[in-house]
Image (cartoon, helix red, strand yellow):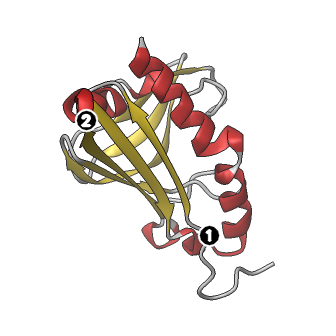
Amino acid sequence: MSTPAGADLTVRRSVVVNATPERAFRVFTEEFGTWWPTGHHIGEAELADVVVEPFAGGRWFERGADGSECDWGRVLAHEPPRRLLLSWHLQDDWEPDPDPARASEIEVRFSPEAGGRTRVDLEHRALHRHGDGAASISAAIGEETGWAGILASFTEVMAS
């Protein structure tokens, strides 16, 4: 089934963490593997780490326990400590498609709040680029086990 033109499948989630934007950004980008749920991986090997290379054009990928790597997307903008923009190249079968025209975007913003806290706003957008699989991707990432659960895991790590 085709996604109707103009359909907004965007998924938005926010959390507030007890950390400065600098620390929240660093943990989100440099320590991705410490908070990313280990069951959320596409490689055949057990998940060992998730890497976000710290520059525009860098890779965003998982590393398996056996050393194998599976690309998830690219770093489109890396602006510490305020903004990270990633492309999402995974299709509705959770297989990567390297074509940037078929990739959605994940923007994460880190905004200071009172008391040394940080608001983390995540927006997964441009899902229509995934074609016929757009609605199922939006549904999956919009579920409690999608971005909401993933950000809850991030929040737990930030609290420790």
Which residue is denoted by mark 1 in the rendering? 9
Q: Which residue is drawn at the image coordinates 65% and 75% (left, top)? A: 131
Q: Which residue is drawn at the image coordinates 46% and 73% (left, top)? A: 101
Report the amino acid beneath label 1. Leu
Residue at the extreme front:
114
Say which quadrant the N terminus sits in: bottom right
Disc nearest the viewer among 1 and 2: 2
Query: In terms of secondary structure, where does tag 2 sit?
Result: helix
Q: Which residue is drawn at the image coordinates 59% and 26% (left, top)? A: 37
Whether residue 94 is visible, yes or no, is no
Mark count: 2
Which residue is denoted by mark 2 in the rendering? 114
Q: Is residue 36 left or right of residue 160?
A: right
Q: Quadrant of residue 133?
A: bottom right
Residue at the extreme bottom:
5
Report the amino acid beneath label 2. Ala
**Label 2: how many Cα within 10 Å (few below 14, some 14–19, many 20+):** few
Q: Which sits in the foreground, 102 or 29?
A: 29
Where is residue 153 shown, x and y percent of the image?
A: 54, 26
Q: Which residue is drawn at the image coordinates 46% and 39% (left, top)? A: 15
Name above or below for residue 124 compared with residue 148: below
Disc with the residue nearer the chain's start (1 vs 2): 1
Name above or below for residue 46 compared with residue 86: above
